[in-house]
């Protein structure tokens, strides 16, 4: 017995029914800490450090209760006293430590690493205000600091600190930790977050994300990805990244020595997996520490580090493959700049006639991915298609030099968070049909036996409907947004970027709006839901948000259309919102331009929860289609080979496509009198002009096919028995996308940790 009633009386001198949700949350946080204290840790010789600029861990209460095996017991005891665990969860502040798929993947990987009993921690920064809290005003995205560090908190302050030497000063870090609990109390690991005690929110200007970028001692960990549209912002990014990796490197070496390393054998004790290029400065920093702190020669230090660091590449977008001017690095961390120049000299000596692989190019710009590839021992992509594109085009020069370094690790998601915690009704259904072994091995294929069982199909339909009602109640309660739970729920939730093509779905919305105005009424009402943030300096992405919000208002105020079509943009979309949205979705929009999405993990979460995917042949969509069969997914669009060729030949003609009679009237509606009457003319005209003259991520190339497919999808939805059978197949085939599988592959092929 948990005796929550007794604990409430002891701690708050009141019964559970009289305690506030905030008080109950504190009670349960203390309970988790009490229960987890007895959990074991893996103390094996070799340890993995997963270094990432983002850890989008989401709210932790339910996940921790689930992994401790007491979620149901807590839920029942609260219900007996008139309390809802979902309302208690809403009292929890969501940690603002990430933004998109990069950070959510890191969180899933930590969960799986602990669940598999591996010795591995996450290492990052303790951002005080995260990216930003998104606020919509006048149909525009606006920005507020996302304060999340209020008590009570899962963060534990430690006595660990390190000195980080910058060019003009040194800083003393402070380490905070969050425990990461493995499922069924297998082991516990940690998320280690470094901070400065001198950081102060007082330097933020009013209620905004603007602050003094030159005051490094007070701003260093204020925000994730601070605006780098000016020189000071650029430098701050480098300060942040170097601070993160210097602490991570010092921590890894210190703990290796404590376990018995003599530093020369560091690779026997330490594996550092860097999550994209943001932590790539850890390579020259490790070399600096080995040379200047441990008196090891430069050449040997380089060889040691080559056997310690592994690199995960998450993108082929040039903008995301980080490059920094060498003089900026010299200003921030001159010792690191000098080491990078020595590393560059090694590469230029070995490959003098292959400038594409040099570390520092002719413009004196440092390519961080090049450092990671040359001076690490493993380079992995995150889906089969992505890895092939890296080898054949984007990183071909490196693949020809290091074919044995390259490998694929298709991303995964933790089923604890994305099914068991977020969709308990579906979890119970699966348990009843196939037992609970899938909790351990993620094998859901036995569900295929239920595909022709009318009772099972009916139960799945009822579960989906209940999740729609749950979403509607949540949005009404927390956002003052009213949606129709009897409508088709069609969802596109991702960070806002042209390559993810939110704008293409917006053009379809225009098509559907006009069709309904012309009397073509859909049999079932449709609710299209967006979620995601645009980077503050990304003007066109903000214009896309403005278009969607303006369309939403136009449709909501049109009595001819609003009963049949609704468009909602969820303000400040985060993990907590996703846990309501994904179980309720009928349709998953995975419509990125082929060749541009490395993997995606939202596609996996929707699939697991019984949504059908509308997808281009991009990222892990390819592997989903292979698993479920073409009859159980809706695919469209040009192939990645076709898109790559168009870019190589500079052959894409946006204006030519625009003049297609089926397309022009849709694009022109962006600057129609109807939209300009409620929207901002500058935003709308800029976006309209960009689509016609540039459309760099080719929203128009697949638009006509997309419209036709969307109409087919909505028509198919009307046959609920067939639709639900397809959903069942998707759920049954989702097991491959467990992050436990991904982490097992990382460990078998790269980390070689003991469990």
Image: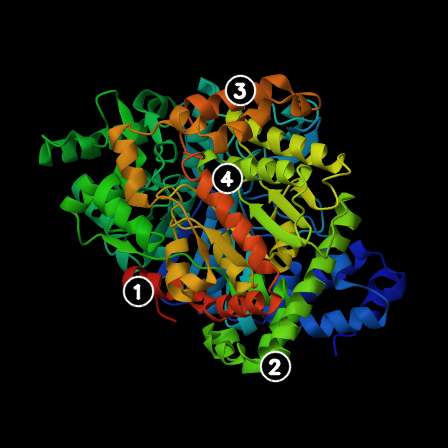
Residue 560 % position (x, y): 75, 39
| Residue 130 in the figure: left or right of residue 235 | right
How many labels were placed on the picture?
4
Determine the CA span between mark 1 and mark 2.
37 Å
Q: CA distance from mark 2 to mark 3?
A: 54 Å
Q: Residues within 10 Å of mark 3 (few under 14, many from 20)?
A: some
Name which of mark 4 and mark 2 comes first in the sequence.
4
Label 2: element kind: helix
- Residue 224: in sight, yes or no? no
| Nearer to the camera, 603 or 408 | 603
Please name the residue that numbered disc 4 is placed on: 173
Front in this rendered view, residue 299 or 654: 654
Labels 1, 2: front one: 2
- Tag 2 residue: 432
Q: Can you tell which mark lies on residue 752?
A: 1
**Which mark is nearer the camera, 1 or 3?**
3
Residue 294 in percent (x, y) is at 28, 44
- Does the residue at mark 1 contact the one at mark 3 (Cβ under 8 Å)? no
Q: Are marks 1 and 2 in contact (CB under 8 Å)?
A: no
Which residue matches tag 3? 686
Q: Are marks 2 and 3 in contact (CB under 8 Å)?
A: no
Between disc 4 and disc 1, the foreground one is 1
Say whether disc 1 or disc 3 marks the residue closer to the N-terminus.
Answer: 3
Residue 377 is situated, as x and y percent measured from the top left of the image, at 24, 51
- The residues tagged by marks 4 and 2 sit, at their Cα atoms, a distance apart of 50 Å
User: In this figure, which colouring scheme has been used for the structure?
Assistant: rainbow
267 relative to 183 in the view: left or right? left
| Disc 4, SS | loop
Mark 4 and mark 3 in contact? Answer it, CB < 8 Å.
Answer: no
């Amino acid at each position: 017995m948990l005796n929550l009633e007794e604990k409430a009386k002891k701690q708050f001198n009141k019964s559970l029914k009289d305690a506030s949700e905030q008080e109950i949350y504190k009670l349960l946080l203390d309970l988790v800490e009490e229960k987890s204290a007895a959990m074991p840790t893996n103390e094996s010789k070799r340890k993995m450090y997963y270094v990432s600029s983002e850890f989008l861990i989401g709210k932790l209460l339910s996940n921790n209760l689930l992994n401790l095996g007491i979620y149901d017991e807590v839920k029942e005891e609260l219900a007996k006293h008139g309390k809802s665990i979902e309302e208690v969860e809403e009292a929890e502040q969501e940690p603002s430590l990430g933004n998109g798929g990069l950070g959510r993947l890191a969180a899933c990987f930590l969960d799986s690493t602990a669940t598999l009993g591996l010795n591995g921690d996450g290492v990052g920064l303790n951002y005080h205000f995260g990216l930003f809290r998104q606020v919509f005003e006048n149909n525009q995205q606006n920005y507020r600091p996302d304060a999340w560090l209020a008590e009570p908190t899962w963060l534990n302050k430690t006595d660990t600190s390190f000195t980080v030497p910058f060019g003009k000063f040194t800083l003393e870090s402070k380490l905070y930790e969050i425990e990461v609990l493995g499922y069924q109390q297998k082991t516990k690991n940690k998320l280690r977050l470094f901070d400065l005690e001198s950081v102060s929110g007082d330097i933020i200007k009013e209620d905004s994300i603007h602050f003094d970028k030159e005051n490094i001692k007070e701003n260093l960990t204020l925000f994730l990805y601070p605006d780098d549209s000016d020189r000071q912002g650029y430098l701050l990014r480098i300060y942040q990244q170097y601070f993160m990796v210097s602490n991570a490197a010092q921590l890894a070496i210190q703990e290796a020595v404590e376990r018995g390393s003599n530093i020369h054998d560091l690779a026997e004790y330490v594996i550092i997996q860097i999550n994209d290029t943001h932590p790539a400065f850890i390579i020259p920093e490790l070399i600096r520490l080995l040379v200047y702190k441990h008196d090891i020669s430069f050449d040997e230090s380089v060889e040691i580090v080559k056997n310690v660091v592994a690199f995960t590449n998450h993108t082929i977008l040039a903008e995301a493959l980080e490059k920094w001017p060498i003089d900026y690095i010299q200003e921030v961390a001159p010792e690191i700049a000098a080491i990078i120049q020595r590393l560059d000299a090694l590469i230029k000596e070995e490959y003098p006639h292959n400038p594409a692989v040099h570390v520092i190019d002719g413009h004196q710009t440092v390519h961080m991915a090049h450092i990671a590839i040359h001076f690490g021992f493993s380079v992995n992509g995150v889906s089969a298609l992505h890895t092939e594109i890296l080898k054949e085009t984007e990183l071909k020069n490196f693949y020809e030099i290091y074919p044995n370094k390259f490998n694929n690790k298709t991303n995964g998601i933790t089923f604890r968070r994305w099914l068991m915690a977020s969709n308990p009704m579906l979890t119970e259904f699966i348990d009843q049909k196939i037992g609970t072994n899938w909790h351990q091995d993620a094998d859901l294929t036995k569900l295929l036996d239920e595909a022709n069982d009318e009772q099972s199909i009916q139960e799945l339909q009822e579960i989906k409907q209940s999740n729609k009602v749950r979403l509607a109640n949540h949005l009404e309660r927390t956002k003052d947004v009213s949606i129709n739970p009897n409508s088709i729920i069609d969802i596109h939730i991702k960070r806002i970027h042209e390559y993810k093509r939110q704008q293409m779905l917006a053009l379809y919305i225009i098509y559907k709006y006009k069709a309904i105005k012309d009397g073509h009424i859909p049999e079932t009402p449709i609710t299209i839901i967006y979620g995601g943030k645009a980077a503050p300096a990304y003007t066109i992405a903000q214009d896309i948000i403005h278009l969607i919000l303006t369309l939403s208002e136009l449709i909501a105020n049109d009595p001819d259309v609003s009963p049949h079509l609704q468009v909602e943009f969820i303000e400040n979309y985060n993990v907590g919102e996703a846990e309501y949205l994904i179980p309720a979705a009928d349709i998953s929009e995975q419509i990125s331009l082929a060749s541009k999405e490395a993997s995606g993990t939202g596609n996996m979460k929707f699939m697991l929860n019984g949504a059908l995917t509308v997808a281009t042949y991009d990222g892990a969509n390819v592997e989903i289609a292979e698993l479920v069969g073409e009859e159980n997914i809706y695919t469209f669009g040009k192939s990645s080979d076709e898109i790559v060729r168009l870019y190589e030949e500079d052959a894409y003609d946006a204006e030519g496509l625009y003049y297609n009679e089926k397309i022009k009237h849709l694009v022109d509606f962006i600057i129609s009198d109807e939209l300009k009457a409620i929207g901002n003319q500058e935003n709308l005209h800029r976006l309209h002009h960009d689509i016609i003259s540039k459309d760099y991520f080719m929203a128009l190339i697949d638009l006509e096919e997309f419209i036709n497919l969307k109409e087919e999808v909505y028509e198919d939805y009307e046959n609920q028995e067939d639709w639900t059978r397809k959903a069942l197949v998707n759920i049954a085939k989702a097991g491959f996308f467990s992050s436990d599988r991904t982490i097992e592959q990382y460990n078998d092929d790269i980390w070689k940790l003991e469990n």
